[in-house]
Amino acid sequence: MTYETLLTETQGRVALIRLNRPKQLNALNDILMDELGAALTGFDADDGIGCIVLTGSDKAFAAGADIAMMAQKTFMEAYRGDFITRNWERIGTVRKPVIAAVAGYALGGGCELAMMCDFIIAADNARFGQPEIKIGIIPGAGGTQRLPRAVGKSKAMDLALTARTMDAAEAERAGLVSRVVPADKLLDEALAAAQVIAGYPLQAVMMVKECVNRAYQAPLSEGLLFERRGFHSLFATHDQKEGMAAFLEKRAPRFEHR
Ligand code: HXC
């Protein structure tokens, strides 16, 4: 597929999506979000893909929603059009893992987009923040909800109220990112992690994602029950028999994703 604002490729069972509006530091406009929704939908439906990496450029993952696009918007347009539901929730409905590989700025909607992914690998030059307050608005795509869950109330308040940004080391300490790597290794590391994931039985991978996400939406007792039933169901799969047999026979498993 050819897109105006994205570059996509596949490497074996891994799909790579690059945001590609370099002149605007990958500011997120309607075209980009529509194309991102389409690309994610396509890879999610593709049986040959087991994991997706979403990245930007060396300078910016995304510097936020496109301010030029928003500047003249009226309340009526925002409210009646339910700005910004348009394809923003799509990323949260992808059932295969999506890794955000973040270098440079991940601000405002860019930080929110990264947080909608399943985990974030950050380059050592990454900067995260919710600076919307500086332009008279507040985060609108989950920044006031996902950020406190990731880093706690105090730091989320600090970031959203002062508009300061945090560097990759602080983001890792706070639990927003899973690992920090040298900027020139970011894509290699993210793709390597994605290859590892894509090599595992897809149904188990998807079940892990569903279960971990339950931890944010359900009381502990419900989440634990959901996990246990998922755990039970994997005993119906070929790959469970193969994985355990391979371990006992001291050989590499041959997973068939079924
Ligand atoms: C539109 C943007 C942009 C944005 C940068 N650009 N961010 N255009 N929307 N969010 C454009 C600039 O206008 C400029 O275009 C070019 O990208 C390079 O940016 P510079 O500012 O010249 O670069 P630099 O000095 O390196 O500063 C980088 C920066 C700064 C710190 C990231 O650009 C910045 O503060 N951007 C805005 C960040 C922000 O406020 N994000 C939140 C947006 S609100 P020209 O044409 O001059 O070269 C939001 C709400 C989300 O995200 C709501 C839910 C979706």
Image: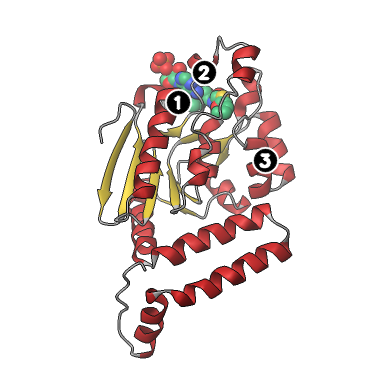
| Disc 2 secondary structure class | helix
Residue farthest to the bottom, as pictured: 249
Marks 3 and 2 close (CB-CB < 8 Å): no
Residue placed at 45% from the left, 75% from the top? 236
The type of residue carrying mark 2 is Ile
Q: Nearer the viewer, residue 178 or 15?
A: 15
The type of residue carrying mark 3 is Gln
Ligand 1 within 8 Å of the CB at mark 2: yes
Q: Residue 168 location, x and y as percent?
A: 52, 45
Q: Is residue 234 visible?
A: yes
Ligand 1 within 8 Å of the CB at mark 1: yes
Quarter of the figure that contains the C terminus: bottom left
Marks 1 and 2 close (CB-CB < 8 Å): yes
| Disc 1 secondary structure class | loop
Which residue is the site of mark 3?
145
Q: Nearer the viewer, residue 168 or 54?
A: 54
**Vertical placement of residue 207 versus 5, above or below:** below
Residue placed at 38% from the left, 36% from the top? 38
Separation of disc 1 and disc 2 at Cα?
A: 8 Å
Tell me which numbered mark, 1 or 3, is placed earlier along the sequence: 1
Tell me which numbered mark, 1 or 2, is placed earlier along the sequence: 1
Which residue is the site of mark 1?
27
Q: Residue 173 location, x and y as percent?
A: 60, 53
Horizontally, residue 155 falls left or right of residue 197, namely: right
Q: Residue 254 location, x and y as percent?
A: 29, 75
